[in-house]
Image (cartoon, rainbow, N blue to C red):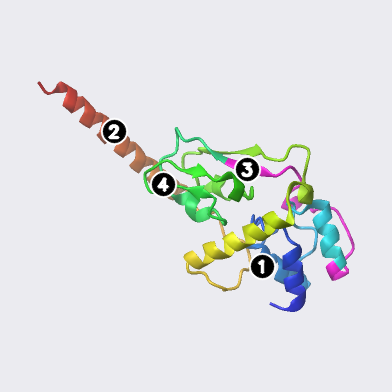
Amino acid sequence: MNALARRILDALPQTQCTRCGYADCTGYAEAIAADEAGIHQCPPGGAEGVLRLSRLTGQPVRPIDPQFGTEGARKMAVIDEAWCIGCTLCLDACPTDAILGIHKRMHTVIETHCTGCELCIPVCPVDCISLEVATPGRSGWQAWSQAQADEARSRYEAHRRRHGKGDEASTVAPPEAAAPDRKRAIIEAALARARAAAASRTDSKARP
């Protein structure tokens, strides 16, 4: 990564949400530095983020391109624990390891670590994850801080190391992590476990 890309990366909010069209903030920073992406593709950074990037690159300030989303209040993921089946797909999807749980057990979100990236939403096979507004009335960098960005970046780098990704290049955002067939298989397996447990309880009650 060259010096300009590093400065651009430092100016990004580190939500790792992929809305910019790249796999992470590093990929987006490198694309901007190479004149392959505009500075108006980061909704979490909002208008202030565009201004920061303009000062670094000399590109003109312009509104966030709506094809990448719109600036808004920061959101936080919330898991409906009554519906969670413990599939662990959201654990792998979360870029900052903000979700705590183990296989076949209820999961929960660690609020202070959630960047509102929304990447856990599409991978949940039972749609038990929703989003709540965490910063009503505040958006972009007004809803985030440099300290939070630094912490999120550190946690993301640790997440990548744990998943064996190291420093490999990040380019275009990956496809949705859970295909419909995979979702269906997980749901069917969960239902099968539930039916087996119910049958076992019925048999136990029927015995003298």
Q: Nearer the viewer, residue 205 or 158?
A: 158
Q: Nearer the viewer, residue 24 or 166?
A: 166
**From the viewer's perspective, is 103 left or right of 23?**
left
Q: Marks 2/1: CA distance? A: 45 Å
Residue 80 position in % (x across, y down)? 50, 35
Q: Which mark is residue 110?
A: none
Mark with earlier residue (2, 4):
4
On the rendered image, what quadrant is the C terminus found in? top left
What residue is shown with label 1?
27
- Span colored in magenta: 56-77
Q: Label 3's element? A: strand
Callout 1 amino acid: Gly
**From the viewer's perspective, is 109 left or right of 115?**
left
Residue sitting at x 71%, y 71%: 30
What residue is shown with label 4?
87
Q: Marks 2/4: CA distance? A: 17 Å
Mark with earlier residue (3, 1):
1
Residue 6 position in % (x across, y down)? 72, 72
**From the viewer's perspective, is 141 left or right of 199?**
right
Q: Which mark is residue 76?
A: 3
What residue is shown with label 2?
195
